[in-house]
Image (cartoon, rainbow, N blue to C red):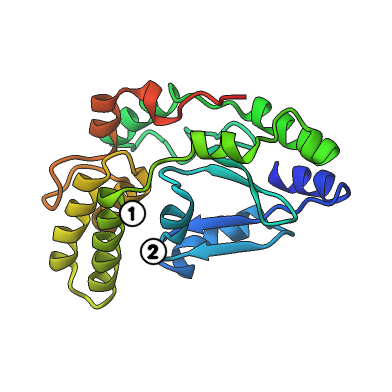
Amino acid sequence: MWQELRAEVHDDGLEVVTVALDSAGPEAARPWIERARPEHPALIDEHHRLDELFGIVNVPSGLWIDEAGVIVRPPEPAFAARPEWDEGIDDDATDYQRRTLALEEQLLVEDEKYVAAVRDWARHGPDSRYALSPEEVLTRARPRGRAESEAAAHFELGIHLQRQGHAAGAVEHFRAAHRLQPENWTYKCQAWSFVDPHLGPSAEYDTDWASEVERTGVEAYYPPLDM
């Protein structure tokens, strides 16, 4: 769907760029990128710089930037199509995988609403009713205080230790990042993925994806689009 949308908006002067947030590097992101066969730039953010710079806390998130480099819409859930959550789930799936699927199917996905807004911005530019003023962008932007900055520092230290083969030492910093910025799902999922590809329970962490979604409420995972 991103390919179709990219082809459509490109004629109106807009460009689509996708970025994979994956500290495991190109080998981890490559299968997903190759499967999508993108014709637009497909980048990999191994250090989660987008979290630091723009306040992204979950994926997929979309960020609109105009030709002058001005943010027109801050990060928000950005689906180009409804995911096939049950892909890869078979008769041999574990109870945890089935629990995860049940939660995923309850997540709010507003793909049609988001794609329609992107198309409108492509056609009308700054006159689009979805293009926000700088004041509105600042109002909606996530605050960047001391806790968020410390969380980013701990996360980067964790990634460094993980790459140096000190996985046990990395856990301490990942846990600190989770504590300081609990709403950042990219930090949580990245750390969990190093010990379990299904983001399930582990000895290293006292929680997991399904447990956290149940604790915070499935309705909070992808907040409604404010359009």
Res. 190 mark: 1
Image location of residue 27, percent across then percent down: 46, 68
Image location of residue 93, percent across then percent down: 33, 37
Frontmost residue, 17 versus 143: 143
Who's the residue at 13% across and 53% down the image?
204
Who's the residue at 88% across and 49% down the image?
11
- Amino acid type at mark 2: Ser
Crowdedness near tag 2: few (<14), some (14–19) or many (≥20) residues, C-alpha within 10 Å: many
Q: Horizontal placement of 149 versus 63: left or right?
A: left
Q: Horizontal placement of 62 versus 128: left or right?
A: left
Residue 53 shows up from this direction: yes
Q: For residue 106, what is the image quadrant?
A: top left
Q: Which residue is mark 2?
A: 23
Quadrant of the snapshot with the C terminus: top right
Image location of residue 131, percent across then percent down: 70, 35
Query: Given contact means CB atoms under 8 Å apart, are the residues at marks 2 and 1 in contact?
Result: yes
Who's the residue at 76% across and 42% down the image?
5
Image location of residue 16, percent across then percent down: 70, 52
Crowdedness near tag 1: few (<14), some (14–19) or many (≥20) residues, C-alpha within 10 Å: many
